[in-house]
Amino acid sequence: MSRYQVSIDIGGTFTDCVVSDGTRLAVVKAPSTPPAFERGFMDALALAARAFDADLAAFLGATGRIVHGTTVATNALVEGRTGAVGLICTAGHPDVLTLREAPRKRAFDWRLDYPKPFVPRTRTFEVRGRIDARGNEIAPLAEDDVHAAVDHFRRCPVDAIAVSLLWSVVEPAHERRVGEIVNALWPEVPVTLSHALNPIPREYRRTIATAIDASLHAIVPAYLGRLEGAVREAGFAGTLLVANCQGGMMTVGQIAARPIHAVMSGPTLAPVAALDLSGEPDIVVIDMGGTTFDVSAIRARALIRTTEAPIGNDLLGLPKIDVRSVGAGGGSIAWVDSGGLLRVGPVSAGADPGPAAYGRGATRPTVTDANLVLGLLDPAYFLGGRLPLDAGAAHRAVATVADALDLEVAEAAYAIHVTGNENMIAAIEDITVNEGIDPRESFLVAGGGATACHIGEMARALGIGRFMVPGVAAGLSAFGGLVTDIRGEETATLHTSSSHFALDAVNRTLAALLGRARRFLERAGVPEAERRYEYAFQARYRYQSWEIEAPFEPAVGALREADVPLLSAAFHDMHERIHTIREDDGEVEFTTWTVRAIGAGGGTAELAATPAGERLPERDTRRVWLGEARAFRPLPVHDGNAPPAGAGVTGPALIDSDTTTILLLAGQRAQADAHGNFHVSVGDGD
């Protein structure tokens, strides 16, 4: 019988592992090991086994499921290490990836070079043949052109082929035939067909998604194969699942077949975790890692999705959970620019060598080094004492910035700390203020091992009166993997309108999507009783250029004529929610239909509540540089491991646990709940 459930999220600096045995949770962290990330993965499993007093083989033998959030796909795209892609497109349309859509950049930024297309023209091949917008064949497919394309790509050579033809989302016959010819001529090369991957009418988004997916076939399947081989060899016989960018998980085979779903997948689990940890309706979720700072928002208990997710100079092309990332983490390097201004990030020290305090030879100062100089971190108790920090090395690194700015070392460290805060505050404002959301009206959930050192000051600057530092803060995204579901979605294009609604055609489309969604869950091994389905459409007012997505609940069996006004009303409501206006008499054009397949992931069992108590155990005092005083002050240090339910601490104070340190400012009071989460509120203080 399976005893353990495991979730592992690989970050740029640390690999986080969260384990549940049904009664308690354990969070462990191991250094990430790029480029062989599977080594850090196995190191984290070994630490998890030790936390439960078991050897690795016995631990894995008693583990029923491992969920993995991977950065391999994202890193490959960001660093340009993907496979070479050949693109087959419709004759006369080779520049879709060059022209893109109107980029959301400053219009008159003369310093911006026009970015290169994801697939260069030298690896783009046009084929004759044409399908129109109604699915009619205007010109037959020129199969000789496809043969010529394969010959050309062999000479390039390419690692994978992407096929994106005009209006294949309406009639895919030409794309399918291209795929058949390529598979017959060159069976070992992976082929991605746009209508099967991302069947939406927008050519650029469909094409870029297809090209990205093809480029990752040389990276993701090989990595997952090595990883699965390593855990199987070590004794794991359970189910290995991989996080996807929709905030759920898929089987290894499903991700390997569509590797684009692994892009930016790990951070999407943080808002999933926040939903499980808090019952608040509106939440801002932050997760500070070693390399990036990720921000997401939850509105009315719903995860926010976006089709605008950028990856480098392009869009991802697929809808995903809206998580914004900036280069601000514990490993972000501080530097002084030519104008004498202090900057923090976006370059990170990463896992190797890491911050100077790690004692691996680094000399450039990072946020972690600054926090150590400020006394926020205990050099003998970092990661529960498993990774002692070199305070002298951190001091020498920060001194380089102090000399450049003519400051005392402690003042320079505080300047680095505050500058990092401002970078993170700007990211929070981007997903709240810039989207019409007042952050003061939201509950804030802070994840990441380093975040709790910064959250008090950030909350004060933003005017946020309540926030939570979960007991699993250091592994928030990994915890999300424990409580998320198996998720996949099936999409089809069918253009119709509220005035001339094609009821029969829409019902046929929804039935076909539902059938594919059911097969997805069958392949994932989800029992019938644990399956559910969500429906959504994309629509716009007539003459609008862009669609928005709205959910709907179809009647049992199929849509009826009486349901069409309800679909329009759902669109009006969503349009008003996003844009603050609605046009109830306006004609609604429906373009895309989606069925989301959801299989219960099992989640964690109800954890045992901790005993009640009034106070946290006090360890000692530590001298900490406080910004308001501009001086070091002795602060009481409390033990944050397994806090008694109801125990409270009023700032200024520190709460140390094995994986995080909370800095409470004057007027901030933290109180532990029954599951080890600290709820912080702003009061008068002592």
Image (tube, grey):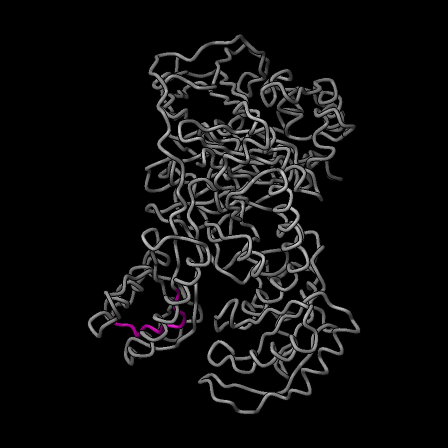
Q: In front: 205, or 586?
A: 205
Q: Nearer the viewer, residue 593 or 229?
A: 229
Q: Is residue 277 left or right of residue 500?
A: right
Q: Position of residue 340 (x, y in %)?
A: 72, 35
Q: Is residue 30 above or below residue 82?
A: above
Percent x, y of residue 207: 58, 70
Task: Report the quarter where the N terminus lies.
Answer: top left
The residue under the point 68% across, 20% down is: 389
Q: Quadrant for the C terminus, please.
A: top left
Q: Which residues are magenta?
A: 585-594
In the rendered view, tell whether residue 365 sits above or below residue 575: above
Q: Residue furthest bottom?
A: 139
Q: Is residue 593 magenta?
A: yes
Location of residue 527 in the rendering, given as x and y in whole percent from the top left corner: 37, 53
255 vs 454, nearest the viewer: 255
User: Considering depth in this image, is 424 or 355 the residue closer to the camera?
Assistant: 355
Q: Is residue 660 visible?
A: yes
Would residue 547 be found to the left or right of residue 559 on screen? Answer: right
Q: Please name the predominant secondary structure of the magenta segment in the image.
A: strand
Residue 159 on the magenta segment: no
In the image, what residue occupies the spot 63% across and 31% down?
30
